Image (cartoon, helix red, strand yellow):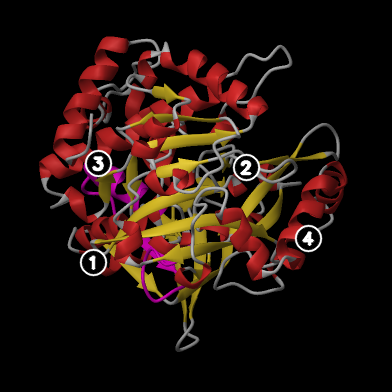
Amino acid sequence: MSSASAAFPDVVLIGGGIMSATFAALLKELSPELSITLFETLEQCGQESSKAWNNAGTGHAGNCELNYTPQRADGSVDISKALAVNTEFDISRQLWAHWVRTGRIADPSTFIHACPHVSLVWGEADVAFLKARYTAMAGHHCFDGMEYSEDPAVIANWAPLAMEGRDLSIPVAATRIKSGTDVDFGALTRSLLSGLQTAPGFHSFYRHRVTDLTKTTDGRWRVTAVNMQTGAHRTVLTRFVFIGAGGAALPLLQKSGIPEARRYAGFPVSGLWLQCTNPAITQHHHAKVYGKAPVGSPPMSVPHLDTRVIDGKSCLLFGPYAGFSTKFLKSGSWRDYFHSLNSSNIIPAMTAGKDNLSLLNYLVREVTQSNHKRFQSLLNFYPQADESQWTKIVAGQRVQIIKPDKGLHGVLRFGTELVRSSDQSLVAILGASPGASIAASVALQVVEKCFPQKISSNEWLPRLKVIFPAYGVDLKQNATLCRELRTNTAATLNIDA
């Protein structure tokens, strides 16, 4: 790599997770000559939210996540959010399949596996909700193959552990989509960045923390990072900065000083999992089984019993149990939250807190409950679970968005959001779920919003149509192409269609 491209890269990436890896790999597909520099605080890539043990690994497609399908006052179910997430995951599938076909990803089984997605509820009210949800979704081609049952024997076939020892005097219902997936985003991140390391013009600096982002008079960004081992500083000048640093994206966005970042605040949410690695148990469960979130809990705390495939081995995760930590990253500082507050966002943060007192109370209860009480929640999904077979592990740290609304009011958001400068020279990814599952969609949005001239001039457009065969097509409307693409990408990725 030339010293010029090292000091003056075309693009700087901050954060070595799935977002940066996906965006960098896509850029190199579109313009192989681009020079890209990545800064990562930790010693390896994909060690925070992208790491397999730090997330559920659900290929979020809206199949089983009941928080994506709210019930209206008249009893009907709104599936618009589920449809949006569903087709955003199609973008990921298209990109991954392209990379498998072109050799950027050697073996899809290193990161993705077929795993049915199941929604499970009990009690008359929730059974009625799930039936209404099924009625709304099953008629749409995006949810082809969705099955519904209130028969305990059928549900036991879908999720054996969930039905063994269950009180059958309580009504139960479930839906299943066999074409769901389990994804190891940490493995995918490592695969993509490993390939990029050999690409001309790409350079990564690990154990480097970005300490300053300054706009120069000629419109470039001066990015300064400190070597955390030696204390030496490295400064580069670039025309474009991509901040994909998970929970640390907000403080970095604030460092940039762009007006668009004003009044944004963050609400950190931690979590715990219960983990089982006993093959005698894991071999009897092959699904991701999602339930309904307790009233007042954040959407990311929807309970679920998941099959995970990590390093070629199957295990089970249950949770997550929500908690509160003032850290913005697992490897971060307890001072992160307080340092993120300033004169422009403290009032939005306070108003959002006032509007979400039930959430705060819920988090306090979650943090203070005993391990035994946490285990009782698992019994709703696995009635015959043995507490001695389950181990507590810490999940990844998430920072939910507090977004400025009317005046100084702040609104808590639970999605994934792009915040970019008016000149499109800097963009940050904020928020959490569906997060990693829609990394390809996020990368594509950044390309479209921040490099519009490359598309309007047709410089990148032909290539985008090769990478994404459905580019420019709404798969929510085009049933024929949707089904065709899902068949093709499933065959390439060795998953169910």
- Residue 420 lies, in percent from the top left, at 56, 41
Residue type, numbered disc 2: Pro
Other residues around mark 4 within 10 Å, as few (<14) / some (14–19) / many (≥20): some
Residue 407, by quadrant, is top right
Q: What element carries label 1?
A: loop
Please state, as top left, top right, bottom left or bottom right, where the C terminus lies in the image: top left
- The image's mark for residue 2 is 1
Labels 4 and 1: the sequence-earlier one: 1
- 146 lies above or below 355: above
Q: What element carries label 2?
A: helix
- 183 lies above or below 450: below
Read off the residue under disc 4.
364
Read off the residue under disc 2.
299
Q: Nearer the viewer, residue 402 or 168?
A: 168
In magenta stretch: residue 47: yes
Labels 4 and 1 touching (C-beta < 8 A): no
Residue type, numbered disc 3: Trp
Q: Nearer the viewer, mark 4 or mark 1?
A: 4
Other residues around mark 1 within 10 Å, as few (<14) / some (14–19) / many (≥20): few
Instruction: Give the residue at x 20% y 32%.
Output: 489
Please state, as top left, top right, bottom left or bottom right, where the N terminus lies in the image: bottom left
Q: Is residue 271 left or right of residue 274?
A: right
Instruction: Give the residue at x 49% y 73%.
Output: 388
Report the magenta residues as a range.
Answer: 20-49
